[in-house]
Image: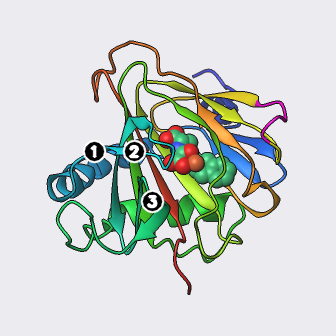
Amino acid sequence: MTLDLFADQDLRQPERHERIGEQSWVLRGFALPRVEQLLPALRQVLRQAPFRQMVTPGGFTMSASLSSCGDWGWTTDRDGYRYSATDPHNGQPWPTMPEVIRQLAVDAAEAAGFADFVPDACLINRYVPGAKMSLHQDRNEHDLTAPVVSVSLGLPAMFLFGGHERADRSLRIPLQHGDVVVWGGVDRLRFHGILPVKDGHHPVLGAQRINFTLRRAGPR
Ligand code: MD3
Ligand code: FE
């Protein structure tokens, strides 16, 4: 038998937690071990609250399609952006947040240094090739001290991570299937967006990217 002094090192993953800001982290592949549980949970939510394209207050139709689950869902129309306790399509409460989704977010937040994250809203975005999200801030949440956790599935995308002013230059961070990103604290109000998703085919999700973000939208 040969003695391999490096056997332990060979089994180690490279460093998979990347710091992208003072209080922001990309956890590479963090969702991969749970994808088989996440997909049926998402499908169940989308049966009750299908993806829809929303219109911004300025009258533009968003290229990404949206849905939500949890106590609060994010919506936009000609009157403005807001969280609503009911789905405007049917007047019913949003679907319950599946436990596998909630637990993934709590674990990711903790891995990034945010203990006691209690998410009450999950926004689900669907990008087909060409869809994008322009640079914006997320500031409709009641408590801006809670972090945001984002989970990327399907086609890759280029995430833009800007500063506190719209004109600040942005970092470009590629996000892959299974990556989880956590933002909070001093980075919570940084501008961010998604470049148009490139055409392609993902073995699990086909020609789309699905991103879901967990937030604390309401008061505690
Ligand atoms: C950074 N979604 O839904 S991940 C959004 O991939 C949104 O679908 C993108 O921006 C997507 O609002 C980007 C999410 C994200 C969400 C909130 C943030 C990044 C953030 C808040 C502060 C800083
Ligand atoms: Fe956002």
Res 180 seen here: no
State whether residue 69 is above or below residue 25: below
| Front: mark 1 or 3 | 3
Q: Position of residue 60 (x, y in %)?
A: 45, 37
Is label 3 in a helix, a strand or a loop?
loop
Question: Which amino acid is tagged 2?
Answer: Val
Which label belongs to residue 160?
none
Sort mark 2 into few (<14), some (14-19) or many (20+) by Cα contacts within 10 Å.
some
Mark 2 and mark 3: Cα distance apart in space = 10 Å
Mark 1 and mark 2: Cα distance apart in space = 10 Å
Whether residue 169 appears in magenta in the rendering, the answer is: yes
Q: Position of residue 35 (x, y in %)?
A: 34, 44
Sort mark 1 into few (<14), some (14-19) or many (20+) by Cα contacts within 10 Å.
some
Closest to the observer, 16 or 149: 149
Q: Which residue is mark 1?
A: 52
Q: Which residue is mark 3?
A: 79
Residue at left 57%, top 22%? 1
Q: Which residue is mark 2?
A: 55
Main SS class of the magenta portion in the image = loop
Label 2 vs 3, first from the N-terminus: 2
Location of the C terminus (image quadrant) = bottom right
Closest to the observer, 143 or 149: 143
Is label 2 in a helix, a strand or a loop?
strand
Is label 1 in a helix, a strand or a loop?
strand
